[in-house]
Image (cartoon, coloured by chain):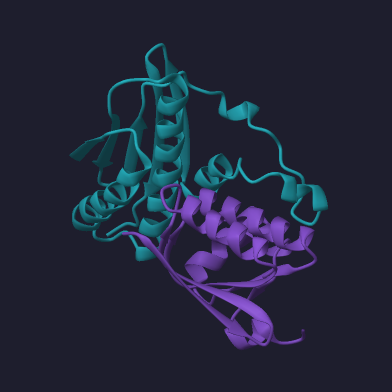
Amino acid sequence: MAVVELAIPARPAYLSLVRLVVDAAVGSLAPGLSAARLDDLKIAVTEACANAIEAHETTYADGPVVVRCIVDDDQVTVEVADHGDGFDPDRIERLPPATDPRRLRHESGLGIPLMRTLADEVSFRRAVNGTTVALTVYRPPD
Amino acid sequence: MQLRTEVSEIAGWTIVHAYGELDVATSPDLREQFIQLVGEGRSRLVLDLDGIDFLDSTGLGTIISALKRARTHDGDLRLVCSQTRITRLFEITGLDKAVPLLPTLDAAVAGG
């Protein structure tokens, strides 16, 4: 198992750096992962980091957002840990279907569904001092 | 990477060519640009996404906002995108049914 960890200030300007590090770390440590799956993972990680940054902004939380890439033989997991108040992913507002004109009233709420679609596994772990989102994609056999 | 835009006019449509990354950090700039364009009376809009390297849910939300603003002002927003990795995000979220997604700029400005 290999672990690469990055701690960023809770500001959107650092999201690009997170993607660069995930790309470099996973690209070199899990070379069998396709470019498309790596793209999926980077989008899912960006969504998790954006939620983490928003949680810090909402609660004026101190401290960094920590991104940890864990590369195992059969899977890659990226954990995103924040110090915000946390949220319940199951209580995210349900969006009307895209063909419903009311859908256009909703400009947010797409992040969690994207994470769930793009990663093979998603888990949300809430604690008193923050939330950790774990996003896993499976590695193809060698 | 930052977001860069160029604006041009074709057949009565205002084309916004976007290059770079459209995420939570850069979306506010694009949102402002659309507000300004519609405010100037340019509500027939095309957003060319072929120069976009990365798109997230905030970027998708910005596009919904621009679509809504354009339609509220008797206009429309059409998208140009030939990259599967970008169009896939519209399909996953179902937004491909809400906003016209065309493979070329010619197709986007055709048909009035």
Image-quadrant location for residue B60? bottom right
Q: Is residue B101 positioned above or below A94 on the image?
A: below
Residue name at image x 77 percent, y 84 percent? B112
How far across and how far down the image is residue A132, in percent? 39, 27
Residue name at image x 35 percent, y 64 percent? A35
Colour of the chain lettered A: cyan
Q: Quadrant of the N terminus of chain A?
A: top left
Q: Is residue A129 positioned above or below A81 on the image?
A: above
Look at the image and tell me whether residue A1 can be seen.
Answer: no
Residue farthest top in this picture: A128
How far across and how far down the image is residue B56, in percent? 48, 53
Colour of the chain lettered B: purple
Identify which residue, A129 or A117, lies in the foreground: A129
Q: Is residue A7 left or right of residue B23?
A: left
Q: Is residue A77 positioned above or below A126 on the image?
A: below
Q: Is residue A60 left or right of residue A18?
A: right
How far across and how far down the image is residue A122, in percent? 47, 37
Q: Is residue B83 positioned above or below A61 on the image?
A: below
Image-quadrant location for residue A11? top left
Identify which residue, B35 or B4, lies in the foreground: B35
Residue name at image x 57 percent, y 29 percent? A89
Q: Is residue A61 left or right of residue A23?
A: right
Q: Quadrant of the C terminus of chain A?
A: bottom left
Residue name at image x 35 percent, y 34 percent? A80
Q: How many numbered marks, from 0 up?
A: 0
Look at the image and tell me whether residue B1 can be seen.
Answer: yes
How far across and how far down the image is residue B71, in percent? 76, 62
Identify which residue, B46 or A97, lies in the foreground: B46
